[in-house]
Amino acid sequence: MSPSLLWPRIVFGVLMVVVTFLTLTPNPVESEPGFALTRWISSLLLGDAENADKIGHFLAYAVLGVTAFWARLAIFSKRWSVVIALAFYGAALEGLQGLGGVRSPELADAFANSLGAVSGFLAGAALGWFRKKAAS
């Protein structure tokens, strides 16, 4: 492994642990859904803060997708397979939420996870392409 890939892979691993922890731990009862930033984005884009949770899911997996691209992660030598794995991972975590009895899984959250992973990976690819184009 190239030394230039070490830090992106460490960042990806840390992000995976954080996303997994936040997905599987119960929310405090008195907390509002989503973070202040996601409530603001939801209000701005959708007219209300009710979908802040979906925005948070999308952003978390978009960051994972960008980081996976940056780290040049691949499964069976196929980089796009990481996006599929992230989408399945996000759906699986949503399913696991229902096992604890404290949180309930939502299909919309799983969809937001998948859409975020794909969008982030594509954004990383586009930025890489523009960077390469600018360098030549």
Image (spheres, helix red, strand yellow):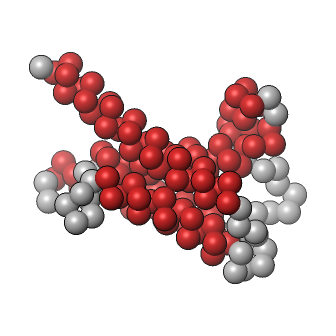
Looking at the image, the residue that sits furthest to the right is 30
- Residue visible at 80% across and 38% down in the picture: 49
Q: Is residue 120 above or below residue 57?
A: above
28 to the left or right of 132? right
83 to the left or right of 108? left
- Residue visible at 47% across and 49% down in the picture: 117
In front here: 130 or 111?
111
In front here: 75 or 35?
75
- Residue visible at 33% across and 31% down in the picture: 126
In front here: 65 or 87?
87
Q: Quadrant of the N terminus?
A: bottom left
Residue 22 position within the rendered picture, expressed as x and y whole percent measured from the top left: 62, 62
Q: Is residue 41 above or below residue 26?
A: above
Q: Is residue 62 visible?
A: yes
Residue 36 position within the rendered picture, expressed as x and y whole percent measured from the top left: 73, 39
Residue 8 position within the rendered picture, expressed as x and y whole percent measured from the top left: 30, 50
Q: Quadrant of the C terminus?
A: top left
Quadrant of the rendered image containing residue 85: bottom left
Residue 114 position within the rendered picture, expressed as x and y whole percent measured from the top left: 52, 53
Q: Is residue 14 visible?
A: no
- Residue visible at 73% across and 26% down in the picture: 44
How many discs mark residues in the rendered view? 0
